[in-house]
Amino acid sequence: MIAKLSGLLDSVAETFCIVDVGGVGYQVFCSARTLRALPRPGEAVKLHVETHVREDHIHLYGFVSETERGWFTLLQTVQGVGSRVALAILSALSPDELASAIASGDKAMLNRCDGVGPKLAARLITELKDKVGGIAFAAPAPAAGAPAETGGGGAVADALSALVNLGYKRAEAFGAVTAAARSLGDKADVSALIRAGLKELAR
């Protein structure tokens, strides 16, 4: 299972990019937001990847941050949201905007996303509101591999990654870390978020 790709950006199309890793070109589908954040072709790039394996294909979905990948996974836990709609949502709204829209019940903002009508917007709010709360996430890290995020958003991403590495499903870990961050505040460090996240998962 591919979880991360680091290589040289070969080319960028409307809905995907090609990452050259040791002479092998990987087609990676991305949100418009991630595609805009990519460096120039020929430059170094690093993407967090979600791999979908189906009977007739293997698709790679790439993101500039762990937070965006977490949202991609979490959105697909809602009935009616597949990979295409999830990418459309992440193309229209940043993780901060998405969290704010769900926490505040802003259906109009969600309706701006391709493929999201009034019913699906209501379902997104109903099913995800308790999982995201009012937490604010850090902006995506530069795709070319700049210094790691700092502050609460970076700690959230690191805690999420740690829980996933412990064997928890990404959507479950995302909800637990989000709840922990909401309770502990934006100054909580990674270890505190992991401990609180584990308590949430144990409930």
Image (cartoon, rainbow, N blue to C red):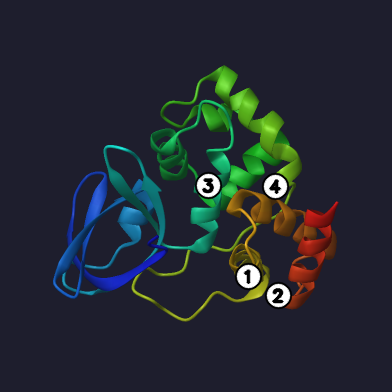
Mark sitting on residue 190 = 2
Q: Which residue is mark 4?
A: 132
Q: Which residue is mark 1?
A: 162
71 left or right of 6 in image:
right
Label 1–label 4 contact, CB within 8 A: no
Q: Residue sitting at 72 percent across and 38 percent down? A: 129
In primary-sequence order, the first of circles 1 and 2 is 1
Q: Amino acid at mark 3?
A: Thr
Q: Residue furthest bottom?
A: 147
Classify mark 1: helix, strand or loop.
helix
Q: Position of residue 73 (x, y in %)?
A: 53, 47
Q: Is residue 45 visible from the viewing direction of this image?
A: no
Q: Position of residue 8 (x, y in %)?
A: 22, 72
In primary-sequence order, the first of circles 4 and 2 is 4
Q: Which residue is mark 3?
A: 73
47 left or right of 163 in image:
left
